[in-house]
Image (cartoon, helix red, strand yellow):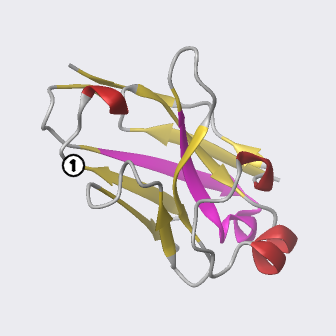
Amino acid sequence: HVQLVESGGGSVQAGGSLRLSCAASGDTYASACMAWFRQAPGKEREGVAHIDADDTATYADSVKGRFTISKDNAKNTLYLQMNSLNAEDTAMYYCAAATPYWCTAYLRGLKAVPHRTAFAYWGQGTQVTVS
C-alpha cells in the first residue's frame, strides 16, 4: 500500500507560479507510475500530467508548455511545477500512483494522461487558487 501526501498549494495571482509536491511512503516501489489530477467545483476530476517508470511524461493539452511533472526517486517525491497560471487552473490538485502491475502492463510509453481509474492510490489533495 502507498500513502500520498500533497503540499505546495495556495493562492497566486494570474501569471504566477507554484510547485506542488507529493511525498510517497509505504510500498514506494508502487509509485513508479504517478500522476497529477485536478478537480474544480462542479467538474469531473481530470488528468493533468503523468510520468511513467522510464520518466516519460505526458500532459493535458491545457497545461502543455506551462506545467512540468518530475519525480525524485531517492526522496520518493513527485513534483508539479506550474508556471503562467490562470484562473482556469483553480482546482483541488491530487497526486495519484498506480500499482506496479498496472504501471508495467499498461502505463508505459503512453501518449496521453491515463484515466483516473488507472490509479489505485490517491492523496487528499491540495488547493490551488488563481485570481
- Image-based side of 50 in relation to 80, left or right: right
Image vertical order of residue 79 relative to residue 32, above or below: above
Q: Position of residue 113 (x, y in %)?
A: 59, 60
Secondary structure, mark 1, is loop
- Tell me if I can see residue 81 in this picture: yes
Q: Residue at x 62, y 34 (%)?
A: 45
Query: Residue at image x 42%, y 56%?
Result: 79
Q: Mainly helix, strand or loop, the magenta region?
A: strand
Magenta stretch: residue 74 in it?
A: no
Q: Nearer the viewer, residue 60 or 130?
A: 60
Judge from the rendering whether residue 24 lies leftward or rightward of residue 105; answer left or right.
left
32 left or right of 62 in image: right
Name the residue tied to disc 1: 83
| Left or right: where 57 falls relative to 8 | right
* Residue 52, picture quadrant: bottom right
Report the residue that reaches farthest toward the top: 42
Image location of residue 37, percent across then percent down: 56, 43
Q: Position of residue 68 (x, y in %)?
A: 34, 61
Specify start and end residues of the magenta stretch as a single range: 19-38
Identify whether 128 is placed above or below 118. above
